[in-house]
Amino acid sequence: MINEQLINPQSIVVVGGSNDLQKPGGKILHNILECYRGEIFVLNPKQDLVQGVKSCKEIKELPTEVDLAVIAIPAKFCPAIVKELIQKKDTKAFIIISAGFGEENEQGAQYEREIVELVNKAGGCLIGPNCIGVINHHHHSIFTEPIPMLDPSGADFISGSGATAVFILETGVGLGLKFNSIFSVGNSAQTGVEDVLAYLDETFDPDKSSKIKLLYIESIKDPDKLLRHANSLVNKGCKIAAIKSGRSEAGMRAAQSHTGAMASSDMAVDALFKKAGIIRCHGRLELATVAAVCMAKELKGENMAVITHAGGPAVMLTDSLAQGGIQIPTIEGPKAEQLQAKLFEGSSVSNPIDFLSTGTAEQLGIIIDACEKDFDQIDAMAVIFGSPGLFPVREVYEVLHQKMRTCQKPIYPILPSVVNADDDIKYFQSKGNINFPDEVNLGHALSKVHNTIRPAKESIQMKDVDIPKVRSLITEFEDGYLKPQQVQELLSAASIPMIQETLVSNEEELQAIINKIVYPSVMKVVGPVHKTDVNGVSLNITGSKFLKEEFNRMTKIEGFEGVTIQPMLKGTELFIGAKYEPAFGHIVLCGLGGIFVEVLEDVSSGLAPLSKEEALGMIHDLKGKKILDGIRNQEAVDIDKFADIIVRLSTMLRFATEIKELDINPLMAFENKIIAVDARVRIEK
């Protein structure tokens, strides 16, 4: 949908251009005139001259065809203007700033639909309505501030909200963040965040294009498109960070399975972002800080030197980095002693390297050189230096600037004195540098960026999953929860091993198999969805007398249809679940079973279909991973087999969207085996 007329128009008309810079039409025209070098026209029936530009009263007065129309007039007049521009001036790109469309009422939504139909029929591009506009190197068609200095190495920023875009820009500019282009898509009537990202992917040039993409998303209309192009850009070497605001009420609806109760639309977003390699952020400052980290040299290892003249911030940064798995290794030995000798008495070089509030610019340079050349265990440096109030700090910041340019190892500047040293920080940023004023925010952002894994190329692993059999069973099954035998058949088609169980519906059937039962056994009621809530599970049945007593007790449970009897296994309880989320597909959850899923909710999520690498990553993310590895003489779980089961289940789900909820709880791991002990599947066609 994005076209050349939007990106690099040879002519622009501002519809509703004004001399009043406090009106959107006035400010947009002013901003365009500041940088645009093509032909510019104004359409305003009440003025002859607007900001030095001749104003046309009607479209037919425009002297030439027009590539781009930027419209800032009441919504009710927009459809007619768009239609006339298309028919008479062959206009192919529109930015509609005006509000009063679908975000307001049904009449506005109708205007919106009319405009989209007109633009689509003309093969054109529409940004908005209800947006702040577009900024790139060719034109600044935007009515707000700030307008950052553009840099090809800066971030491409796409926002679904105009006001939020302004606030994020302000936050980023405050850190010294650079931008390459800004797209505010507003109501996304035709062109949404996903469409702009697709354009940036399809036109990506590894030598010229920005490698940082920032997104603010209020609604994901096309998850597959977002996933496809984000994945593509990340695999081309880009970093993508995004805020997704809002939580779907549909995602919070009541559900009867553990997975249905835990999984939400927001969890689907998490899974989608993880699969795409998108760094998810939850606030403006976090997004801007993550972007700033991405603009620095990449942290290759996991060891950081913290260089400081203040102990407290160094401790807080160390804690923040450690939480994200970034280490602050001890520095010692002869070279450390040599460095110590060059600093004032009382300084410490053990790491954090504290050179005191009296530390000088020269000493900072010596410390950075030592970390760069002498200490091989150090992969990067964080430098904390505010204003101690004893001497000007500009000389220190100049040394820091020079070292950031010459060192091979990344250096992250933390200059917290945003009041005392405001002029010096602005001087530092004017040289193209970023400042991280808060050490904890830097630590969290750096950890997020460092721990984000580049996504594998998507492929569906079909091995051991009988898709024709799955489809045949799904077609045969009726809506609702499947019966135990049906669950067995379905899981068998995906090669998911399940414990053999016997279904008994009456006393005669029980009597017929009672001598074949292996003890100890487990009996579970069939009928009620939540068996434990109705006391419908009996464990450690050791003989036929106890078996009969429990059967007779369960026949009195409301909803009783029968019982299943199975051998009682001992081992580590695991859990796999899945829930279908419209537009996204199946969210797959895994974790430890039993109390860990019911109370602690120690689960991780992914989006089907999953690769083996993704499944292993989900298992690794569990807080209880050490239990799976085997602790206190407990047998370790075969992680590889667990991951294989997750992958096969996700493949089955990819071809069975009728499965709306699925729980396998527990999967029992023992003696290098993993067997499904209990499962629940709900079909909705």
Image (cartoon, rainbow, N blue to C red):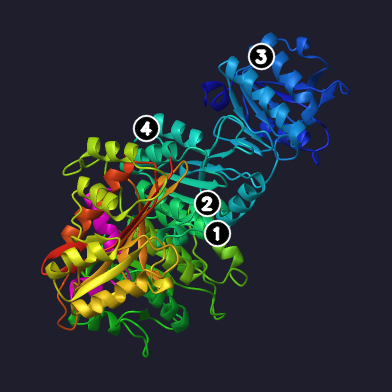
Identified by mark 2, the residue type is Lys
The label nearer to you, 2 versus 3, is 2
Helix, strand or loop for disc 4? loop
**CA separation in Å, label 2 and label 3:** 35 Å
Identified by mark 1, the residue type is Gly
Disc 4 marks which residue? 205
First in residue order: circle 4 vs circle 2: 4
First in residue order: circle 2 vs circle 3: 3
Q: Which percent across, then down, holds residue 557?
A: 42, 69
First in residue order: circle 1 vs circle 4: 4
**CA separation in Å, label 3 and label 4:** 31 Å
Disc 3 marks which residue? 86
- Against 64, is 75 above or below? below
**CA separation in Å, label 1 and label 2:** 9 Å
* Mark 1, other Cα within 10 Å: few <14 / some 14–19 / many ≥20: some
* Mark 4, other Cα within 10 Å: few <14 / some 14–19 / many ≥20: few
First in residue order: circle 1 vs circle 2: 2
Look at the image and tell me whether residue 469 can be seen.
Answer: yes
Disc 1 marks which residue? 283
Q: Residue at x 24, y 58 (%)?
A: 616
Q: Residue at x 22, y 47 (%)?
A: 494
Disc 2 marks which residue? 244
Helix, strand or loop for disc 1? loop
The magenta segment is 610-630
Q: Is residue 476 shown left or right of residue 630?
A: right
